[in-house]
Amino acid sequence: MDMRSEGVASYTQLIEALGLANRIIENSNDIIVVSEAMPIDQPGPRIIYVNKAFVKATGFTEQEAIGKTPRILQGPKTDQTTLGRIRSALQKWQPIREEVLNYKKNGEEFWQELNIFPVANESGRYSHWVAIQHNITERKVAEQALLESERRMALAAKAGGIGIWDWDMKNNCLSWDHQMHVLYGIEKEDFAGTYDAWYALVHPEDRKIIDEAISKAINTGEFNAEFRIIRPDQSICHIHGSAVVMKDDLEVAIRMIGTNLDVTESKLAQDEIKELAFYDPLTKLVNRRLFEDRLNHKLLRVQRSQHFNALLIIDLDHFKEINDSYGHQLGDLKLIDTARRIKGCVRETDTVARIGGDEFAIILSELAEDQTKAGMEVKKIAEKLCKSLSMTNYLVDLTKKMGKSSETIKDRTSVSIGITLFQDGRASQEQLISEADTAMYQAKRSGGNQFKLHESDIQE
């Protein structure tokens, strides 16, 4: 083949290639727009070509688009910052890729991934811009829906006092959302973002709860615990924490994602309800209901113990005279002081209760295994109680609170105490209370200001 024939063949191939390219451009699913290179600013480069995808996607005909600028696709919500970046790139003849919110002819919004690059002529001078736009509306709508969902979740978490956390166990990286920092009273820059940094904020008495809950979560896949934290201002907050555990293919825990909820108010409310249900509102001692429950549990436990225990019933002598002569206000103050003095005579492990108007009860636990020695221990405590509760001058401080002169107060109050010992659990709760009651009335009939052991204990 001669040179002339080769030239004809090359030209033919070029024409065919151009035809093929044109068919590809025309039938592309992506929008393709060719515009003049200048002017970049107002009124902007004019469109000289659009493909079928442009007409289909925008609603503009080819005739309506030719001679206009690409700005016909912009609308009120098109981001001006994005447009500024595009303009800056065009001024420097640089290619650029951006995601742009465009508008169809009918005003409907659609998102495009916009790729713009300059095209030079034979002399190397930039003569045109080519823009290829890929429709990403579906993805952007999904992203916006996700962002809106996250925003609503964040608002709901904030309104409910819920903090969200993410612990990368493998790399020991603990991430908190804003509400977590609010719950713990710590600024973002002051939190180290590690498990140890969080663990240090947990109340020392509750760290065992956390250790057990974490260990259980690694096995079961769920974390659930209620614990206290100490904020930097030393205030204490009750937290309910819950989370799920993510594991790798080898079933090794690698991540925990969960929430923290401030339950301080509900916890305080529960404590208040418990206080009302089980404690005497005046003296703050255990009430009769909780006293009987503890006595019943003690009877169950003594079957496995060789130690003696004791039940004391205490009744104030001549208390009615205080109420009748000086009013219930002074009577209430005396009951409060009596409760304080009783607690001062026994151990913290013993139960002190107010079971009636001026009647109190004590459960003494874990006395000696020998009955005689146990009896001696109880007698020492009973003597201490009689001495402390029969002092006639302890109303002086109380009368000062009422603005009265202590010389006007005549107090003959003393105590009568009934005692019964128990060890093997053969006696019932009702029997023990009856025995201690009987011994108390014997002490009262004997003139008061003394204690009596139940007859069976004396015989023993």
Image (tube, grey):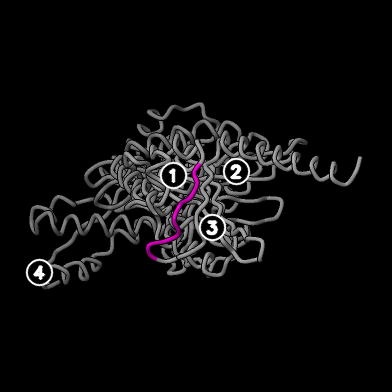
- At horizontal 39% and vertical 28% (from top left) the residue drawn is 431
Q: Which residues are magenta?
A: 42-50
Residue 167 placement, left or right of 350: right
Q: Which residue is mark 4?
A: 408
**How far across and down, in percent of the image, does residue 149 sit?**
42, 42
Image depth: mark 1 or mark 3 in front: 1
Q: Amino acid at mark 4?
A: Thr
Residue 387: quadrant of the picture: bottom left
Q: Amino acid at mark 1?
A: Gln
Viewer can see residue 310:
yes
Disc 1/disc 3 C-alpha distance (Å): 38 Å
**How far across and down, in percent of the image, does residue 272 sit?**
31, 47
Q: Which residue is mark 3?
A: 202
Q: Earlier in the sequence, mark 1 or mark 3?
A: 1
Viewer can see residue 452:
no
- At horizontal 44% and vertical 32% (from top left) the residue drawn is 296
Residue 20: quadrant of the picture: top right
Q: Which residue is mark 1?
A: 144
Q: If the image is split into quadrants, where does the N terminus sit? A: top right
- Residue 213, disc: 2
Residue 289 placement, left or right of 218: left
Disc 2/disc 3 C-alpha distance (Å): 13 Å
Give the secondary structure at mark 1.
helix
Q: Earlier in the sequence, mark 4 or mark 3?
A: 3
